[in-house]
Amino acid sequence: MNMKYLLTVLFLVLSAIIFISVNKSDISILQRAALQGKAEAQNNLGNCFLKGIDTEKDEPKAVEWYQKAANQGLAKAQYNLGNCFFYGLGIKKDEKKAVEWYKKAADQGYADAASSLALCYDYGLGVEIDKEKAIEWHNRAKTLKN
């Protein structure tokens, strides 16, 4: 084997080790910030647990962290919590609660929540079908996305 090949392999192995240790460090930094009550960190930690990023996938734990951030008024956490209720991710499926959380996020100008709310009104998911409200939320979402 030539020296260039060995150095390349060594470089790749060391890079992988450094990458893994940095990611483990990143999750612990995120956890510390979340435990300090930082809503953005709590939401991001929820994402990690929901998707199994740098940790074991744990949907109920994701819901706990989304709930903490959502209770502080973070719109994207409210939307994420709404999705958990809507799809039954880590918590019992409850379309009415999903609509409540989507509305809180949409009222703050979170476009994806407004789109989800429009679909709920359009198809009667968690609310009575109301085509006027569906159009209103769809238009609001379109405006927010532009």
Image: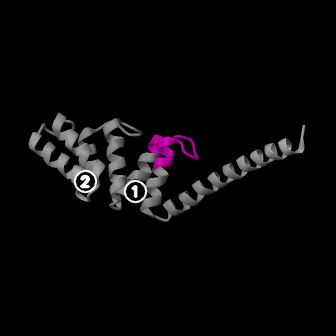
- Residue 133 at what x, y percent from top left? 12, 45
Nearest the eye: 39 or 123: 123
In the picture, measured across the screen, residue 8 lies left or right of residue 140, that is: right
Identify the amino acid type marked 2. Answer: Ala
For residue 135, what is the image quadrant? top left
Question: Is residue 59 rendered magenta in the image?
Answer: yes
Residue position marked by numbered label 1 in the rendering: 68
Residue at 37%, 53% (x, y): give it. Answer: 77
Picture quarter with the N terminus: top right
Residues rendered magenta in the picture: 47-61
Q: Residues within 10 Å of mark 1 (few under 14, many from 20)?
A: many
**Local SS, label 2:** helix
Q: Position of residue 3 (x, y in %)?
A: 89, 44
Distance between the Cα atoms at labels 2 and 1?
A: 18 Å
- Please give the residue where the numbered disc 2 appears in the rendered image: 106
Q: Nearer the viewer, residue 20 or 58?
A: 20
Q: Earlier in the sequence, mark 2 or mark 1?
A: 1
Query: Tags 2 and 1 in contact by the CB under 8 Å rule?
Result: no
Look at 34% across and 36% down and name the residue there: 87
Q: Residues within 10 Å of mark 2 (few under 14, many from 20)?
A: many
